[in-house]
Amino acid sequence: MAIEQAIFRRSELLLGDEAMSRIGEKRVIIFGVGGVGSWCAESLIRSGIRKLTIVDSDRVCITNINRQLMATTKTVGQVKVEALKERLLTINPSAEITALQQIFTAETAESFQLDSYDYIIDAIDSLKDKALLILMACQTKAKLFSSMGAALKLDPTKIQVAEFWKVKGDPLARALRNRFKRDKQFPKRKFQCVFSDELLENKGHNATCGTEQCMCPKAKNGPGDPSLLNHEWCSSKAQINGTLSHITAIFGFMLAGLVLQDAVK
C-alpha cells in the first residue's frame, strides 16, 4: 500500500484522500481495448482505479501499432487483453485487472454481469453488438460512457462530449439511432458520448497489410499461424478506415476523464 500511496501522491494532492479512496473502490469494465479502449484503461489505472475488467477477443495485429497502447513489434500475435493487462500491472501491481478474451454479443451478454459494475465503457466497433451493449447497460445501475467513431479524423480540437441523442455529424451515432428507431428499442436513460464531427476520406487503399509479420489473411505473404485467426477481425470488416493515435488516445482519455469526474462528484 505504501507503493500505491507514492504512485498516486500527485492525484491525491489534487483530489484529496476521500476522493482517491472512492475512486479506488469503483468497478469499471471496458468493452473493446483497441485504439480508444486501451488508452482509456491506462488512464484509469494511472488515476487510481483498482478494479478493472477489460474485454476484447482480438490479438495484436501489426496494423494496430500506429494507435493501440499495447501494440508493439514485440506483442504482435499476443492476445490484446493479456498484453494490456501485463502493461497495466507494471503501473500498479496491486490493481485487480480481469482480462477477458471474449466478444460481447447477444449470446454472451449475460455472462458479463453488467449490474455488478459502477461504470461501463463502450469502445465497441460492431454496430449490432454496440447497440445491444448500450441497451443493456442503460438498464443497470452502472453509468455508461460510449465512444463514437474515432476513425477518419485528424483535428484534435473537434473532439467533444455530448448526450447520445445530441451527437451531431457522427455516422456511427446516426447508424445507432436509426437502428434503435427501426427496432423500436431505445436506451432507458441518457448517456454521454465522446465524438468528433470531423469526417475525412481515406487516401490510401486496403489491399494488404503489407507485412509478413501480420497474422491476418490480408498479410502480404498470406496468413500466419491459423490458430491466431480465430480472434482477428480487421480482415473481415467491410470497410477499414484510417486512424491516428492522437485522436484515438484523446477519445480514450476523455472517457477516462468522464469516469473520474463522476467518481469524484
Image: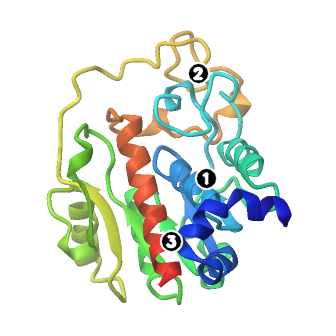
- The quadrant in which the N terminus is found is bottom right
Q: How many marks?
A: 3
Along the viewing direction, whichever of 212 and 42 lies nearer the viewer: 42
The CA distance from mark 1 to mark 2 is 18 Å
Residue type, mark 2 in image:
Cys
Along the viewing direction, whichever of 51 and 128 lies nearer the viewer: 51
Bin the neighbour count of mark 3 within 10 Å (Cα to Cα): few under 14, some 14-19, many 20 and up: many
Decide: marks 2, 3 in contact (CB < 8 A)? no
Residue type, mark 3 in image:
Leu
The CA distance from mark 2 to mark 3 is 36 Å
Residue 19: x %, y % from top left: 59, 80
Question: As displayed, is residue 193 above or below residue 227?
Answer: below
Q: Earlier in the sequence, mark 1 or mark 3?
A: 1
Residue 186: x %, y % from top left: 31, 83
Question: Farthest residue toward the right?
Answer: 1
Q: Which mark is residue 56?
A: 1
* Residue depth check, mark 1 versus mark 3: number of the one nearer the observer: 3
Residue for badge 2: 214
Decide: marks 1, 2 in contact (CB < 8 A)? no
Question: As displayed, is residue 116 above or below residue 112?
Answer: below
The CA distance from mark 1 to mark 3 is 23 Å
Q: Earlier in the sequence, mark 1 or mark 2?
A: 1
Residue for badge 3: 260
Q: Secondary structure at mark 1?
A: loop
Bin the neighbour count of mark 1 within 10 Å (Cα to Cα): few under 14, some 14-19, many 20 and up: many
Along the viewing direction, whichever of 86 and 128 lies nearer the viewer: 86
Could you tell whether 51 is left or right of 133 in the image?
Answer: right
Q: Secondary structure at mark 3?
A: helix
Q: Secondary structure at mark 2?
A: loop
Can see residue 134? yes
Residue type, mark 1 in image:
Asp
Q: Quadrant of residue 224?
A: top right
